[in-house]
Image: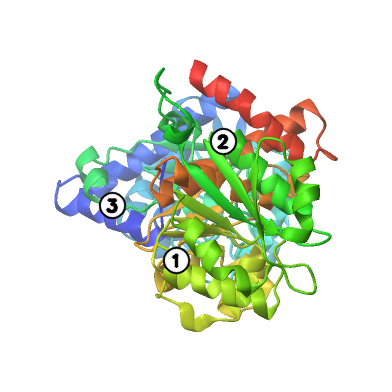
């Protein structure tokens, strides 16, 4: 599903109005009509129901005036709370205020604190609230009378229908601008906005309904829209397997992971690659750990490598690592590997010299953050999978900044470093160097547990060696990872399921997709 920023949506509207000569008044009418139809679909007959419509400045307020008129035409009883002086309305909003006067709709101007006092009592007797205060163009912090009204709306027990976006929500970042309406339904126009599908904005949206307001398909097709929300259709990217296939058909993944006390990360990464269809997986591991890994990993091959005094990989095995890497289709690097200087030499060489697609995670990213001079010097397609803390180290920003600017952080790092960037967390983001970005809706809080990222790394590696382009490999793995987590939460319980149980859910998920 395509997503847009506020600026992109404004551009789409302008193109429809100026190139295709669709009157803006017609677009506003269609928006209002679509909202009323969405209310009818959700709540049924509106006749006789009292509905409070809060109208602010600009086109969003104009949409609210259309909605009030169409509600009155359907025998509902709308009451309009006009939060700006009527004389200040311009353009299409002024036209629709004039049209509204033709209906017996009560209009109350709210200009000061005294006017505010009457709103709570009136909401007690209202069936629903329509929020048409601010639209997607809002960038300033909500204050004064608007802030007070939003707080009153949020205290009411009425269903709240937001027009285009809940007032007070930044449509690009999903961050509330001070206060924000908490909607039960959001009826958005044309295309979904990115702030509606990422957290914390997603928590303010309620049910999201997208309404066609008459923008020509050609306008949307020709717009440079590079943002999208992943859906179950990504599962259809998986090609059917032919009867003549063999293990070599589906690629060989070389995993460099694990160290004393952290062998679980290596196991989860390696086994999840097999669960996602990689034909062969070899784990490169210090020789001192090889015996225990051979006991643990029945289906995964191992490559015993020289280790140092601390039993982590030694740079003395670098040539062997590079030689083996040249014989496989791709690599997964980092889970539980360690971050000492010897391993630092290994990862620097992998970044610069190895020409196989790779996925980097965990300790490999910590070492990458220590070597900013590597930017742009990679020899192959690379997917990096930082959690917010790792991203903070990579870009030298606090974790809080990363969480408040997730889209910017992922896209800018992908562009500057020339890598596919998977920024993990609620609504994981996958960004490409050319500006494309995908948002993942699957997953749940039960996945906030050790080992989940190791499973994801192995999954991405599996799709890399099966021939998927890196951006698609990462996107597909991210969606499946979250969906498998959702299945585990359903089958095991919302808390306490393990990363291994997410991994074990994958074959069942593949069966479901293949059957569809």
Rounded to the nearest whole Å, what is the CA distance between mark 3 and mark 1? 29 Å
Which residue is labeled 3 in the image? 13
Which residue is labeled 1 in the image? 414
Badge 3 or badge 1: first in the primary sequence? 3
Q: Nearer the viewer, mark 1 or mark 2?
A: 2
Q: Residues within 10 Å of mark 1 (few under 14, many from 20)?
A: many
Q: Nearer the viewer, mark 2 or mark 3?
A: 2
Q: Nearer the viewer, mark 3 or mark 1?
A: 1
Residue 344, placed above or below residue 136: below
Q: Which residue is at the front of the view, 471 or 111?
A: 471
Q: Which residue is at the front of the view, 151 or 99?
A: 151
| Image quarter of residue 189 | top left
Q: Position of residue 482 (x, y in %)?
A: 63, 40
Q: Position of residue 85 (x, y in %)?
A: 48, 63
Query: Is label 2 in a helix, a strand or a loop?
Result: loop
The answer to whether residue 230 of the structure is visible from this angle is: yes
Rounded to the nearest whole Å, what is the CA distance between mark 1 and mark 2? 25 Å
- Residues at circles 3 and 1 in contact by the CB criterion of under 8 Å: no
Which residue is labeled 2 in the image? 276
Query: Which mark, residue 46?
Result: none
Name the quarter where the N terminus is drawn.
top left
| Image quarter of residue 149 | bottom right
Badge 2 or badge 3: first in the primary sequence? 3
Query: Is label 1 in a helix, a strand or a loop?
Result: helix
The answer to whether residue 134 of the structure is visible from this angle is: no
Query: Is label 3 in a helix, a strand or a loop?
Result: helix
**What residue is rendered at 42% in x and 51% in y?**
471
Rounded to the nearest whole Å, what is the CA distance between mark 2 and mark 3? 42 Å
Q: Position of residue 54 (x, y in %)?
A: 56, 50
Name the side, left or right, on which 497 lies relative to 57.
right
């Amino acid at each position: 599903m395509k997503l847009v920023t506020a600026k992109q949506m404004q551009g789409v509207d302008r193109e429809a109005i100026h190139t295709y000569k669709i009157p803006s008044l017609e677009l506003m009418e269609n928006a209002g009509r679509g909202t009323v139809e969405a209310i009818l679909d959700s709540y049924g007959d509106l006749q006789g129901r009292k509905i409070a419509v809060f109208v602010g400045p600009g086109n969003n307020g104009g949409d609210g005036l259309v909605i009030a008129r169409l509600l009155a035409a359907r025998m509902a009883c709308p009451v309009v709370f006009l939060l700006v002086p009527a004389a200040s309305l311009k353009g299409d909003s002024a036209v629709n205020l004039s049209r509204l006067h033709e209906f017996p709709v009560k209009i109350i101007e709210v200009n000061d604190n005294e006017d505010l006092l009457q709103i709570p009592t009136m909401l007690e007797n209202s069936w629903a609230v329509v929020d048409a205060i601010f639209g997607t163009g809002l960038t300033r912090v909500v204050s004064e009378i608007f802030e007070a009204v939003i707080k009153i709306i949020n205290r009411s027990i009425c269903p709240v229908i937001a027009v285009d976006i809940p007032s007070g929500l930044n449509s690009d970042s999903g961050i509330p601008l001070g206060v924000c309406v908490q909607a039960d339904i959001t009826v958005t126009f044309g295309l979904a906005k990115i702030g509606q599908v990422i957290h914390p904005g997603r928590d303010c949206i309620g049910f999201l309904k997208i309404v066609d307001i008459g923008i020509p398909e050609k306008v949307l097709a020709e717009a440079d829209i590079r943002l999208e929300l992943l859906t179950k259709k990504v599962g259809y990217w998986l090609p059917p397997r032919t009867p003549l296939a063999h293990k070599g058909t589906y690629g060989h993944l070389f995993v460099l992971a694990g160290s004393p006390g952290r062998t679980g990360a290596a196991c989860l990464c390696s086994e999840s690659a097999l669960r996602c269809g990689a034909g062969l997986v070899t784990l490169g591991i210090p020789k001192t750990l090889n015996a225990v890994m051979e006991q643990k990993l029945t289906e995964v091959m191992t490559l015993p490598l020289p280790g140092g005094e601390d039993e982590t990989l030694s740079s003395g095995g670098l040539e062997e690592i590079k030689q083996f890497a040249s014989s496989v289709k791709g690599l997964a690097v980092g889970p539980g590997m360690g971050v000492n200087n010897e391993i630092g030499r290994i990862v620097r060489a992998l970044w610069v010299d190895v020409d196989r697609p790779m996925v980097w995670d965990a300790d490999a990213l910590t070492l990458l953050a220590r070597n900013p001079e590597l930017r742009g010097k990679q020899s192959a397609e690379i997917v990096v999978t930082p959690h917010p803390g790792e991203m903070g180290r990579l870009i030298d920003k606090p974790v809080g900044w990363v969480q408040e600017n997730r889209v910017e952080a992922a896209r800018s790092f992908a562009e500057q470093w020339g890598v596919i960037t998977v920024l993990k967390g609620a609504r994981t983001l996958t960004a490409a160097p050319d500006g494309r970005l995908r948002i993942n809706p699957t997953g749940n809080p039960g996945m906030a547990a050790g080992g989940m990222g190791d499973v994801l790394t192995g999954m991405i590696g599996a799709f890399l060696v099966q021939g998927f382009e890196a951006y698609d490999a990462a996107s597909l793995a991210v969606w499946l990872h979250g969906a498998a987590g959702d299945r585990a939460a359903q089958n095991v319980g919302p808390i306490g399921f393990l990363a291994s149980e997410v991994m074990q859910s994958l074959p069942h998920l593949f069966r479901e997709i293949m059957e569809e």
